[in-house]
Amino acid sequence: MSVKIGEAPYKERITKGIENDFMREAVSSAQGRFRAGRLTRAEELGNWEDWRQLGEEIRTHTLENIDFYLQQLSDAVSEKGGNVYFAETAEDANHYIQNVVKKKNAKKVVKAKSMVTEEIGLNDAIKDLGVEVVESDLGEWILQLDEEAPSHIVTPALHKNKKQIRETFTKKRGYDQSDDPEELAAFARKELRKDFLAADVGITGCNFAIAESGAITLVTNEGNAEMVTTLPDTVVTVMGMERIVPTWEEMEVLVSLLTRSAVGQKLTSYITAYGGARLEDEIDGPDDYHLVIVDNGRSKILGTEFQAALHCIRCASCINVCPVYRHVGGHAYNSIYPGPIGAVITPLLDGYDDHQELPYASTLCGACTEACPVKIPLHEMLIRHRQILVERENKAPMSEKILMNGFAKWSSSPAAYKISTKLARPALTPWIKDKDRIENGPGPLKGWTDVRDFPAPSKKSFRAWFKERESDSHEHSK
Amino acid sequence: MSIQNRESFLNNLAGRLHRPRRTQGVSRPDWSVYPQYDVLKGITQDELVEVLEKQCEAIHTDFIHTDRKGLPKLLEETIRNYNGKSMIVSNDSRNEEYGLSGLYKDLDRDLNVHIWDPRLGKGNQVIAEQADVGITFSDITLAESATVTLFNNKNNGRSISLLPKTYIAIIPKSTLVPRMTQAANQIHEATMKGEEVASYVSFISGPSNSADIEMNLIVGVHGPIKATYILVD
Ligand code: SF4
């Protein structure tokens, strides 16, 4: 399992994140831009809440019937001349794909960005065979040249500036032009073309698999996923088992939600539906096609109170609005899934042991839940994680236990944090430097506050706060 | 083709959901809302053209509006503007219908025009990769997002719209619909009737782009660097 990225302790990771000024600025301006984009696109649609409602209904129905839809999907893919492999674990999936690569005597594999292949550690599995793996998204390619894990779901190289990118190109590929982004991109285009043309096997992830027709939908801007599925004779799609929709019509709705939420675009430049082997006399596309459907811990979430976490369409909206992410950046989460959704699903996929701090990497402000296009109650799930950690697993230090008793009572609404922090205030008092900053909080706050002052919980009384909230919601309803 | 490990995998899922396995009888419920049908509802074909034209600006795509008579001349101009010395074109019956077969023959005198030919096999890809311009018709055109939909098949390889440096889409006005909803609906209906839907459907909105370097929009990454839509009445 490689949901986890490294062994550096949490505190070290966030310190590193906070000290990296460029990173923080980049993250924060990216957040602003993504967010503004999302808001305009949402406004244009007018009835955004209806869209979210529909998104939630579709995801709920699909996950409730996931066994049926996966069966339908696999039948359809097989009818179109594709092979389908159901992989319970990361090892199963890697092993199957290794065999495909071996059988083809492949020398070179090209990939299009995919979190699930990152999750199962596919690149290493292929490299173990002595086969070259090329990541073809611009951002991922840059990271690959630099051997780093991605820091953001949508634009993975967010924490690198163009000078650093130019340096990487020069060092690794003998690049000798300027750090103008267009020139950098043109160079990458030229380099990667050779790889697309020479590759024996193409591997992509999957945004949405359409059960009724066995088509895999990919949502991209650069056109590399199209190269990867068009040029090599062997193509493998790796999909997390939950990335499925009943028909073309639901695909369309979720794609609309995804592109608006993820990048503020009406549609990305390429929405591609492919799958199965090419037909007779067709030249583009593979003659050997494989779909690998991955569980890798997901089924443990089914049938639990966290089931809705599987509704995620990986738009990164929750990340873009998260004040904690803004400060610490993606790597601090030590998971390939950062931000609020990462804090929710990483402990579910990989267990609490290595990720105890993640449920605390949130101010419970509820912005994530509000931003989520399929209405996953993210911050409520984080509260549940905390309760579970405190009450059942007994893994959290004493100071949190006191806090958590407060949270537990109020765990069902966004109000929880502010109300509970009122209870927490006396416990924090000794560490409060001036009236609004905590210098050294106990427990999880300490990790933050050693490197940067963390805003103290608001001192307002519950009544004052409630009154304000009331009038706020009046404003909204006007 | 083969399906492996399905039974144990799906049985496990059913078990996790605390119910017996569902192998049939599941259908989509009526959703409580259908906001997708409200977008650009009830507007005329001419208004859709306006929406399309406006959105083209947002996606860095040149937009030209003409009629059948004007098409060959404007197409040639666009090709020459792109400095196109070589081009690859889909083998589409509409080439004849729209009077383009003649144009391509003429152009072939001083430029290289290749019409997609299944007999050439992978040779088509090699030509596409080196071509300056790729030209196809749009099968369904989405006004809201300025998207051309291509049903790729043996006469219309997807390489044409993907590998050349620039891309020109010819859009018959009759293919205009409000948004992706209508396209998805058409494909869904066809699938239900058991009609063969293309093995590869591309929804293309303008040239390829990326924001991976410092969040600056870079137009032209792996796919075409420039794109023009020619709408034909
Ligand atoms: S949890 Fe919601 S907002 Fe976050 S990435 Fe997933 S779908 Fe997007």
Image (tube, coloured by chain):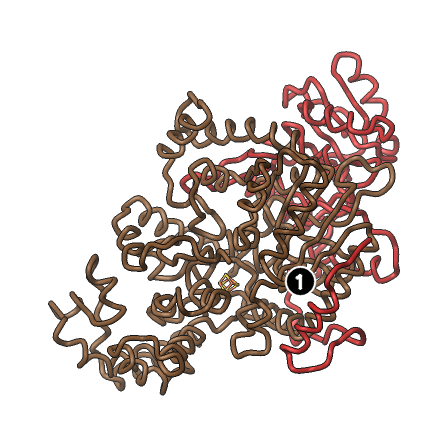
Chain colours: A brown, B red
Is B145 drawn above or below residue A335 in the view shown? above
Query: Where does the image place residue A281, in percent across and percent down from the top left?
Result: 86, 36
The single residue placed furthest to the top in the displayed view is B110
Q: Is residue B196 above or below residue B152?
A: below
- Dividing the picture into quarters, in which one does residue B30 lie? bottom right
Q: Secondary structure at mark 1?
A: strand
* Residue nearest the viewer, comparing A396 with B214: A396
Query: Is the residue A418 above or below the residue B156 in the image?
Result: below
The x, y position of residue A11, in whole percent, is 28, 59
Left or right: B117 in relation to A392: right
Residue at 38% across, 75% down: A475
* Mark 1 surroundings within 10 Å by alpha-carbon count, few (fewer than 14), some (14 through 19), many (20 or more): many
| Count of numbered circles in the view | 1
Taking the spot 88% from the left edge, 55% from the top edge, the residue there is: B195
- The amino acid type found where label 1 is placed reads Ile
Quadrant of the image containing the C terminus of chain A: bottom left
Q: Report in which chain the residue with disc 1 lies.
A: A
Q: In screen coordinates, is A236 left or right of A36?
A: right
Residue at image position (60%, 68%) is: A55
User: Position of A387 compared to A371: left or right?
Assistant: left
In the depicted view, which residue is nearer to us: A401 or A341? A401
Residue at 64% x, 78% y: name it.
Answer: B17
Does the numbered disc 1 mark a residue whose Cβ is under 8 Å from ligand 1?
Answer: no
Viewed as shown, does residue B79 lie left or right of A144? right
Residue A244, position as x, y percentages in the image: 67, 62
Q: Which residue is mark 1?
A: A244
Q: Is residue A474 visible?
A: no
Instruction: Decide which of A211, B108 is in the foreground and name it.
Output: A211
Q: Position of residue A63 (x, y in %)?
A: 64, 71
Answer yes or no: is residue A295 visible. Answer: yes
